[in-house]
Image (cartoon, rainbow, N blue to C red):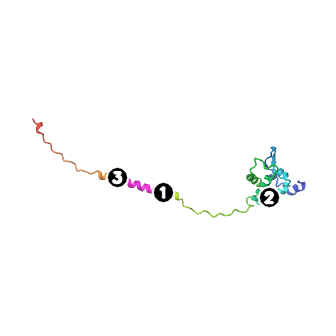
């Protein structure tokens, strides 16, 4: 199991990791990383040091496998990938800068927004069509208003029946 020499040799830099809770076991007892590793008959401090030397994705995968291998399985409320990543982040030296830099993705080139272009063209065509219809209505209305010269008054002559 664990001897006092391995704890003193490695120091307390792993305490945050080793004493972090994983979840509750089947007896509703809080299960820490140290107790989980001890249940697997592993030296918690040596295993913590081994995990700290790995790249973060490998350490997460290894810890996830160890937790899944626990007698009785992983705690029921333990989310394997998120929980292992949370725990590995507590290891000393597990910083984003330690992992290899992500592959640089070239910047995206500007892609024209065809929906916007089409809607602008349709709107312009609609506006020109509306102007054409309005202009043609005004032209037809003005052609129907024929100006007629003022009519001359017609002289009225008395009708013969009215003079009697």
Element type where label 3 sits in the image: helix
The residue sitting at the front extreme is 72
Which sits earlier in the primary sequence, circle 1 or circle 2?
2
Element type where label 2 sits in the image: helix
Image side of residue 121 versus residue 80, left or right: left
Mark 1 to mark 2 CA distance (whole Å) = 58 Å
Which sits earlier in the primary sequence, circle 3 or circle 1?
1
Which mark is on residue 120?
Answer: 1
Residue assigned mark 2: 52
| Dominant SS type (magenta) | helix
**Residue 59's quadrant in the figure?**
bottom right
Element type where label 1 sits in the image: helix
The question of residue 125 being in magenta is answered with yes
Q: Are marks 2 and 3 in contact (CB under 8 Å)?
A: no
Image side of residue 84 versus residue 154, left or right: right
* Residue located at (80% from left, 54% from top): 66
Query: Over which residues does the magenta segment extend?
Result: 123-133
* Residue located at (30% from left, 53% from top): 143
Which mark is on residue 89?
Answer: none
The residue sitting at the top extreme is 164
- Residue 65 lies, in percent from the top left, at 78, 55
- Residue 10 lies, in percent from the top left, at 85, 57
Mark 2 to mark 3 CA distance (whole Å) = 84 Å
* Residue located at (82% from left, 54% from top): 14
Residue assigned mark 3: 138
């Amino acid at each position: 199991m664990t001897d006092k020499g391995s704890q003193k040799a490695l120091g307390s830099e792993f305490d945050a990791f080793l004493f972090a809770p994983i979840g509750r076991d089947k007896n509703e007892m809080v299960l820490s990383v140290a107790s989980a590793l001890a249940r697997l008959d592993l030296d918690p401090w040596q295993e913590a040091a081994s995990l700290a030397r790995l790249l973060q994705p490998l350490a997460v995968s290894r810890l996830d496998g160890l937790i899944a291998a626990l007698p009785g399985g992983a705690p029921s409320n333990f989310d394997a990938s998120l929980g292992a990543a949370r725990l590995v982040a507590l290891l000393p030296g597990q910083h984003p800068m330690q992992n290899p830099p992500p592959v640089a993705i070239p910047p995206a080139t500007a892609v024209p927004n065809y929906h916007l272009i089409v809607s602008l063209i349709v709107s312009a065509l609609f506006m020109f069509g509306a102007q054409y219809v309005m202009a043609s209505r005004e032209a037809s209305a003005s052609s129907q208003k024929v100006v007629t010269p003022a009519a001359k008054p017609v002289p009225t002559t008395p009708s013969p029946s009215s003079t009697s």
